[in-house]
Image (cartoon, helix red, strand yellow):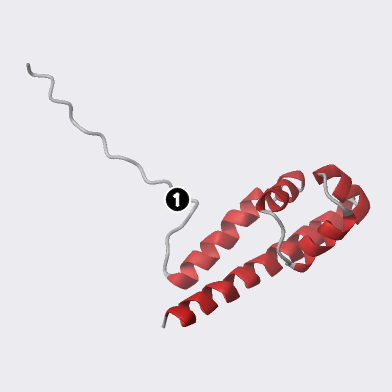
Amino acid sequence: MIKKVINMRSEQAAKMAQKLGDLIRQHRTLHYTQSTFAKMIGVSRSTVQKLEQGDVVKSDILFEALVVLNLQGALLDEINELAADVGGYNARQRKRNSPQEINDDF
């Protein structure tokens, strides 16, 4: 049972990485070459290739690429979709604390 859950999570993570890689490639090609984009985020061109193919890269590289392309919301959308598949919560929703009455009668 545990292996099944781990495999499901691995498949979902791979699917998310591929979707984000495709999204980054689509937006990057509108404005930059791989080499130019790589210099902007401080990595090699081969790292940009890995990122766009959905391969494993450091999370800070992924985040920097998303910020440079102004795609931070896309990451939240992917997280929400993944969470919905698993029955999770919406990362864009903020829980509000209900106002609490303060007993100031001393």
Q: Residue drawn at (26%, 34%), measured in percent from left and top?
A: 99
- Whether 84 is drawn above or below 93: the answer is below
Q: Taking 25 as reference, is 85 left or right?
A: left
Which residue is under mark 1?
93
Q: Quadrant of residue 74?
A: bottom right
Note whether residue 33 is visible. Answer: no
Q: Residue drawn at (76%, 58%), measured in percent from left and top?
A: 24
Q: Secondary structure at mark 1?
A: loop
Q: The C terminus is located in which quarter? A: top left
Q: The N terminus is located in which quarter? A: bottom left
Q: Residue drawn at (72%, 59%), measured in percent from left and top?
A: 57
Note whether residue 18 is visible. Answer: yes
Residue 64 drawn at (x, y percent) = 72, 46
Q: Taking 90 as reference, is 37 left or right?
A: right
Q: Quadrant of residue 98?
A: top left
Given the image, on which type of amino acid does mark 1 rest?
Answer: Gln
